[in-house]
Image (spheres, rainbow, N blue to C red):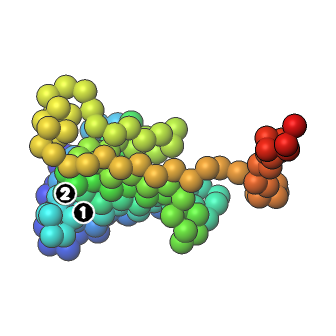
């Protein structure tokens, strides 16, 4: 089965939500879905998913978003951005020509092997990654490191 949707398309599956100008969805005999969501430079396709049992979200946008439910994989292609949020606070973020996000293992890969990845990286576009260090919530914030002052200049 396959279908094409155009206009202001919203696809939801559980806590996952994708918005795009055009979406192509195919389903294999096992019921696994593969979706391609297309946006534009002016209006990228967007992705948002709530993580199980916590107030944490992953969200991203790109000119094209590919969602593979069988592989638990989302690929953001073309001016791609991915953000991890705790509530409304962004904890981690990445920008690249291509981002692959594995929702099962919560891992992010920037770029890809093969010609598509090489073409994406050579087409310009900066790769940026910002990670917030994870600290146990019960631990007090780390104290600044205090170094002893050198004993130089004591006149001896």
Using the image, determine if residue 73 lies above or below residue 79: above
The residue tagged with tag 1: helix, strand or loop? strand
Q: Residue at x 64, y 60 (%)?
A: 54
| Image quarter of residue 29 | top left
At which x and y percent is residue 63? 19, 57
- For mark 1, does the 10 Å Cα neighbourhood hold few (<14), some (14 to 19), or many (20 or more) residues? many
- Tell me, for residue 13, which label it has, or none: none
Q: Residue at x 30, y 46 (%)?
A: 127
Looking at this rendering, what residue extends furthest in the top direction? 114
Q: Residue at x 36, y 59 (%)?
A: 60
Q: Quarter of the image for the C terminus: give it.
A: top right
| Image quarter of residue 37 | bottom left
Nearer the observer, 154 or 68: 154
Q: Residue at x 30, y 60 (%)?
A: 61
Number of callouts = 2
C-alpha gap between disc 1 and disc 2: 6 Å
Q: Describe residue 128's horizontal placement relative to residue 123 as left or right.
A: right
- Tell me, for residue 63, which label it has, or none: 2
At which x and y percent is residue 30? 35, 37
At which x and y percent is residue 58? 46, 57
Residue 34 visible in rendering: no
- For mark 2, does the 10 Å Cα neighbourhood hold few (<14), some (14 to 19), or many (20 or more) residues? many
Residue 138 visible in rendering: yes
The residue tagged with tag 2: helix, strand or loop? loop
At which x and y percent is residue 99? 32, 44
Q: Describe residue 48's horizontal placement relative to residue 137 as left or right.
A: left
Q: Are marks 1 and 2 in contact (CB under 8 Å)?
A: yes
Q: Describe residue 72's horizontal placement relative to residue 116 as left or right.
A: right
Q: Describe residue 115's horizontal placement relative to residue 45 as left or right.
A: left
Identify the residue position indicated by label 1 in the image.
45
């Amino acid at each position: 089965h396959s279908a094409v949707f155009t206009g202001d398309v919203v696809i939801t599956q559980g806590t996952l939500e994708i918005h795009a100008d055009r979406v192509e969805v195919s389903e294999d005999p096992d019921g696994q879905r593969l979706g391609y969501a297309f946006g534009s430079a002016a209006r990228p396709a967007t992705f948002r998913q709530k993580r199980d049992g916590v107030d944490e979200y992953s969200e991203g946008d790109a000119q094209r978003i590919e969602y593979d439910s069988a592989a638990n994989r989302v690929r953001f292609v073309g001016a791609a951005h991915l953000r991890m949020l705790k509530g409304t606070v962004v904890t981690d973020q990445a920008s690249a020509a291509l981002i692959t996000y594995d929702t099962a293992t919560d891992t992010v890969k920037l770029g890809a092997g093969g010609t598509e990845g090489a073409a994406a990286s050579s087409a310009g576009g900066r790769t940026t990654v910002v990670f917030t260090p994870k600290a146990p919530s019960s631990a007090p914030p780390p104290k600044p490191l205090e170094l002893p002052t050198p004993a130089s200049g004591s006149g001896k």
